[in-house]
Structures are given as structure tokens and as C-alpha cells.
């Protein structure tokens, strides 16, 4: 049975800049949110990560929501979602973040909510489910040394598996991520991470490749594409009945072209923002493809993988 290969595209930055300028002039909520997020980023860079320090920005979230009350658009929903994200990811106030997600689902019931969660337990997973979260993502790390030396956390691998287990016990769609080369560009815990995810009923596994460009020079190596390709093959073998996707994050340029070629050849089900030439490779080996404009974790993770299928998507 021939597979279907799904390709993702993105609007050009020039077009986006023009749209943002026009939106700002019209007091569009998308541009207003962008300006607010820029202010928050500036404060975070200065080390201000407290609710008191960000009180003015939190008030601005409320002001924007009041200004656009009654507008049931995705742009307005993003305002509420970003406020929830501020509480969960910056202020470490999970309770308030969950309340805001509940409000988001009430006000925008047709909106799909996907969150990338930190370590949690059964109670935390159930609270996400109750809030209406549709898809939960998490990083699965397979080496204690990587957790300790890269993430600087004093937590064992077992805690990451416990989080995955708690999430999978809910009705949410679960799409864990494995970062290839996470240990400063080395392959270390990836085989164990594959062992872990293979034990659970996932909707999809998302593979990404570490991008060392924001680290100090010399701290990270770029993983060899042949090593990345071997991880792709092993993931496909171990999760033959589940979707395996190549996510957005991976080094650009020739590395991306080689990585995406390996993804097509290995039979992965999805490629986000495929490199030039990926479609040609799919055509050359007889893999039909189609295009979707959506996050791969939501679009593909929402449906089980067809039997005897070898699809590739984005």
C-alpha cells in the first residue's frame, strides 16, 4: 500500500510583516498581542520573572480581552492562551494557568488546545484533561546524565516516564518529543527514550534534532545526519503501528536536506516545513504526498496510523 506524504509550508516573513503593520493600524488583536509579548520578553531578559514584576503586562492582557470582548476569533483566543502560557511556563503558577485554559475552552469551544508540558503527575495530567486540553506534548529524555548536565535538573529518567504514563492515562492525545543529539550533540539517551515511548499508546511521536546555534560556540556539536537517520529507522521499527513525525526543529541548510531525505526514506509519517528536494525524493520512491496547514502534533496525532501504511506528513 502506497503511503501519503504530507508537506507543510509557511508564509514569507515579508508578507507577515506587512500584515502585522496593517493589523496594528486597525488595532487588530494579533498585532496588539505581538507588542505585548515583546514587552514581556524584554522584562524576562532583564531577569524579571515574578507576578509582581509583570503585573502591568498581566493587566494589559485583561485590557485586550475586554477591548475585544465578543470577538470569537483565533487572534483573540491567542491572547487568552498566551496569558495562560505566561502563568504555566514563566510564573510557575499551574493552578492559575489551568483556570485560564478552562476559560479558553469555554469561550472558544471549537479551538484545539495543545500544550508542551513539564514534568507532572496523575493529578496534574487530570487537571489538564479537565481544562479541555486536546493534545499534550512533552520531552522524553533517556539518560540521567543529560537531565543533570544539559537540563540541570536533579530528576531521574523514571520521572519523565512517570509523566508520560500519567498523560497517557487521560483521554488527551499524547505526542511526546525526542530531541536527537540533546546531550551537546551526542547520541546518548535516544535509544532508551525510544524504549520508553514504545511502551505507551501514543497518538504520535515527534522527533526533532538539536539546533546548537543559540548556545555558546563550541558547547554543542551538530549531530551527524547518518546518526539522525539511524534514529529515524529505529523509531519507525519500534513504533510500526503509530505515527512518527519529524518536527519543526532541526539544523538548516544541507543538514536539513539530508535529514529530510532520511525521514522520507525511513518511512516517517510527517515532515514539518520540508526542505527543498524532499518532495522530489518522495516522488522518486513512489510516495504520494499531500499538504496540511497545521501543527503536526495535532493534525496527525489526532488519528491512528493506518495498518501497513508508510505515510509522511507535515
Image (tube, helix red, strand yellow):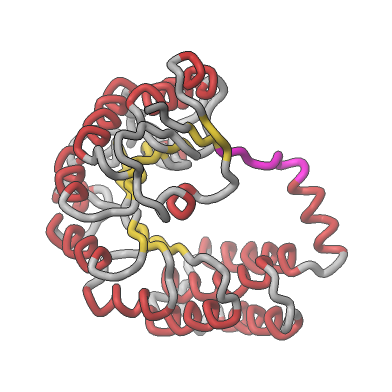
The residue that appears at 76% across and 82% down in the rendered structure is 67
Q: Nearer the viewer, residue 312 or 123?
A: 312
Provide residue 194's location: percent of width, then percent of height: 20, 43
Provide residue 187's location: percent of width, then percent of height: 22, 33
Provide residue 6's location: percent of width, then percent of height: 51, 36
Q: Which residues are magenta?
A: 8-15
The residue that appears at 62% across and 72% down in the rendered structure is 77
When asked about the image quadrant of residue 237, the answer is top left
Q: Is residue 55 left or right of residue 162?
A: right
- Residue 167 lies, with reference to residue 94, above or below; the image says above
- Tell me which secondary structure the magenta stretch mostly adopts: loop
- Residue 193 lies, with reference to residue 163, above or below; the image says above
Q: Is residue 285 left or right of residue 188?
A: right
Q: Is residue 134 shown to the viewer in this render? A: yes
Provide residue 306's location: percent of width, then percent of height: 35, 42
The residue that appears at 26% across and 31% down in the rendered structure is 231
**Residue 220 sits inside the magenta stretch:** no
When asked about the image quadrant of residue 273, the answer is top right
Q: Is residue 188 left or right of residue 172?
A: left
Amino acid at each position: 500500500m502506497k503511503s501519503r506524504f504530507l508537506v507543510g509550508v509557511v508564509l514569507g516573513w515579508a508578507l507577515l510583516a506587512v500584515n502585522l503593520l496593517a493589523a496594528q493600524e486597525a488595532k487588530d488583536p494579533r498585532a496588539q498581542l505581538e507588542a505585548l509579548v515583546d514587552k514581556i520578553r524584554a522584562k524576562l531578559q532583564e531577569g524579571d520573572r515574578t507576578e509582581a514584576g509583570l503585573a502591568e503586562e498581566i493587566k494589559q492582557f485583561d485590557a485586550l480581552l475586554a477591548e475585544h470582548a465578543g470577538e470569537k476569533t483565533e487572534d483573540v483566543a491567542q491572547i487568552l492562551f498566551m496569558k495562560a502560557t505566561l502563568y504555566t511556563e514563566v510564573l510557575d503558577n499551574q493552578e492559575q494557568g489551568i483556570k485560564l485554559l478552562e476559560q479558553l475552552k469555554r469561550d472558544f469551544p471549537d479551538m484545539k488546545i495543545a500544550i508542551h508540558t513539564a514534568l507532572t503527575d496523575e493529578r496534574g495530567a487530570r487537571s489538564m484533561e479537565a481544562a479541555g486540553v486536546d493534545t499534550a506534548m512533552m520531552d522524553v529524555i533517556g539518560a540521567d546524565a543529560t537531565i543533570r548536565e544539559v537540563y540541570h535538573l536533579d530528576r531521574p529518567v523514571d520521572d519523565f516516564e512517570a509523566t508520560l504514563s500519567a498523560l497517557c492515562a487521560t483521554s488527551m492525545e499524547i505526542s511526546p518529543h525526542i530531541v536527537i543529539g540533546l546531550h551537546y550533540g551526542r547520541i546518548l539517551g535516544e535509544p532508551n527514550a525510544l524504549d520508553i515511548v514504545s511502551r505507551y499508546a501514543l497518538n504520535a511521536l515527534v522527533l526533532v534534532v538539536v539546533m546548537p546555534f543559540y548556545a555558546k560556540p563550541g558547547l554543542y556539536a551538530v549531530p551527524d545526519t547518518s546518526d539522525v537517520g539511524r534514529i529515524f529507522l529505529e523509531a519507525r521499527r519500534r513504533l510500526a503501528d503509530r505515527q512518527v513525525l519529524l518536527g519543526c526543529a532541526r539544523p538548516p541548510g544541507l543538514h536539513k536536506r539530508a535529514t529530510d531525505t532520511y525521514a522520507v526514506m525511513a518511512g516517517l509519517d510527517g515532515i514539518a516545513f520540508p526542505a527543498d528536494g524532499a518532495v522530489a525524493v518522495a516522488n522518486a520512491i513512489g510516495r504520494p504526498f499531500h499538504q496540511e496547514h497545521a501543527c503536526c502534533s495535532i493534525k496527525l496525532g489526532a488519528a491512528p496510523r493506518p495498518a501497513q501504511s508508510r505515510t509522511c506528513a507535515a
